[in-house]
Image (cartoon, helix red, strand yellow):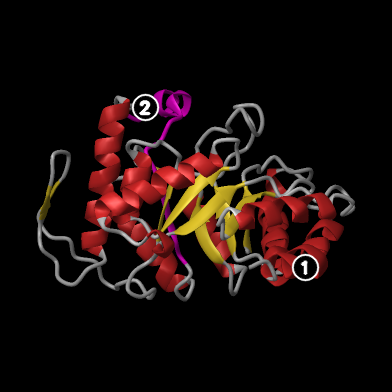
Amino acid sequence: MKLGLQIPDFTWPNGASALGADLAAVVRAGDRAGFDSIAVMDHFFQIGAVGPTENDMLEAYTTLGFIAAHTERAKLLTVVTGVLYRHPGLLAKAITTLDVLSGGRAILGIGAGWNEEESRGLGFPFPSVSERFELLEENLQYVLQMWADGDAPFKSKHFDAGRLLNVPQALSKPRPPIMIGGGGEKKTLRLVAKYADACNLFNGPDLERKLDVLRQHCENEGRDYDSITKTVYHILDVGENGEKSGELLAELERLNGLGIQVALGMVPHVHRPVVLEKFATEVIPAAEKLA
């Protein structure tokens, strides 16, 4: 099993003036520790599950570009980009640019979006659920065409583009992987089966059922279920000094038994060097042995 480090909180002890240096130190340590990926959220306001709305929040793709410059091997992604915030042409160019400048390490994490508070606050349109899912599918179709050969036009219900020119193309072959986040059983998991290379589910009591639903959608779409990487969001908590490492490894073993291949999430106390050292010496080597 592989582990991904998500960084959702930027209200750090040394303040904004030191945030660049502090973030660089954390992601370098995470990269050296062996995390398979490093991720950020795609939000403009902090979300309630992490902290007060007014807490610090960095723009996702600017931050991933910065992280790329301070790492060498970890894949880079958002968990996950909301389709409300960027035209798909801009999104495809952002991912392509990240992929080229990082040496082929970009992943597109994408979902329908949900945060009405930040959308209304900054003046982004916030359409209905059904329209957001229309936008999600059309975004997927658009970016896939951007990463294919040629520069043909693209026309759909919401987009009308005359020439999908994308130069330079991404280094990742055949294209950057696509991970769809969310566990909606009728729409989201159907889109995973139809378009995605990976899903991202929450580690909750319904996880096994979600996987069964995804399997059924794969059968309906003629897709090999095993070709989709199953990832789960789980807080990777080893405690302030590594005292919870055993508990985390037990949970990773359980998830592995369900067919989960990647666990990604925030690491509490990530600023403490002992925490990432514990991942490097104990947790990640043990997780990688799970089969």
Residue 81 visible: no
Residue 207: x, y in percent?
54, 41
Residue 117 colored in magenta in the image: yes
- What range of the chain is rendered magenta? 106-125
Q: What's under tag 2, amino acid-wise?
A: Gly
As drawn, is 71 to the left or to the right of 29? left
Write the residue at 41% across / 28% down: 119
Disc assigned to residue 112: none
The residue carrying mark 1 is 280
Q: What's under tag 1, amino acid-wise?
A: Ala
Find residue 28 and report its image quarter: bottom right
Disc assigned to residue 123: 2
Residue 100: x, y in percent?
41, 72
As drawn, is 237 to the left or to the right of 196? right
Judged by depth in the image, the label closer to the viewer, 2 or 1, is: 1
Write the residue at 52% across / 61% down: 76
Depth check, front residue: 21 or 198: 198
Residue 97: x, y in percent?
38, 65
Q: How many marks?
A: 2
Work out whether 164 lies above or below 91: below
Find residue 133 and report its image quarter: top left
Work out whether 131 lies above or below 288: above
Going from N to C along the chain, the mark reached first, 2 or 1, is 2
Write the residue at 53% across / 43% down: 208
